[in-house]
Image (spheres, helix red, strand yellow):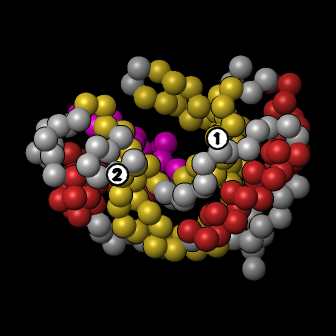
Amino acid sequence: MPRLFIGLGLPETYQQSVTPFTDGLNAGLDASVRWMRPGNWHLTLKFLGDIDEDMIPAIVETLSSITFREFPMQAGDSGAFPGVKRPRVIWLGLKQGAQQCADLAEVIEEAMADIGIGREKKRFRPHLTIGWVKRPGQDDWKAVLARANQDWPEFTAKRFTLWQSELNPTGAVHTVLHDFSLKAD
């Protein structure tokens, strides 16, 4: 069964900036962090999990019927889940587009529920994951996250995507299954 998720891809300027950005954050860290790789960086709107292949046409058809306007996005401040004392996930928030991402995620959540895919239990919090802490260290994560605050370019979210994610020892490989256009103004 393929492992699927729905999300917003990030532009090439973001994809090519992720490695120099995370290399800067990684400098001097005691912790071991697996950082996002270029080409994989995205904002997840809905994680579907392992899905029977027979469901994919219904998912694509349902997502194709969603009407939502394009909107501006821009990465902003940084943070960690569950918190800075013992972070497991390092992320960037959104300076622009957070409400639109939340609204689009809710539309997708409703659409997927209509075809029998379970609802998320946690509240949606729009964020761009940049790394996963694999082994904690004695780091001052407040200082590390303060270094993550930089000026990211604004871009327009013009489509959302259904991806297949294959896990392997060097990290996930994401394959686009289908793009869905957002409406231009």
Please say if 171 is above or below 111: above
- Does 138 appear in magenta? no
Q: Residue 37 magenta-drawn? A: yes
From the image, tell me which residue sits under label 1.
47
Spot occupied by residue 143 in the image (x, y as percentages of width and height):
17, 59
Q: Is residue 60 left or right of residue 11?
A: right
Q: Secondary structure at mark 2?
A: loop
Q: Residue at x 16, y 52 (%)?
A: 140
Query: For the view shown, which residue lies furthest in the bottom direction?
Result: 185
Foreground: disc 1 or disc 2: 2
How many numbered marks does the figure carry?
Answer: 2
Segment tinted magenta in the rendering: 32-42
Q: Are marks 1 and 2 in contact (CB under 8 Å)?
A: no
In this picture, is 73 found above or below 6?
below
Quarter of the C terminus within the rendering: bottom right
Q: Is residue 159 visible?
A: yes
Left or right: 158 in relation to 25? right
Q: Which residue is at 77% across, 59% downward?
A: 107
Task: Name the residue at the left extreme.
Answer: 28
- The residues tagged by marks 1 and 2 sit, at their Cα atoms, a distance apart of 22 Å
- Amino acid at dot 1: Phe
Q: Residue at x 54, y 59 (%)?
A: 126
In the image, is residue 128 above or below residue 169? below
Amino acid at dot 2: Gly
In percent of width and height, residue 97 lies at 57, 71
Q: Which mark is residue 92?
A: none
Residue at disc 1, secondary structure = strand
Specify few, some or many for label 2: CA neighbours under 10 Å numbering under 14, 14-19, or 20 or more. Answer: few
Instruction: Pick the quarter of the image with the N terminus.
Output: top right
Q: Which mark is residue 83?
A: 2
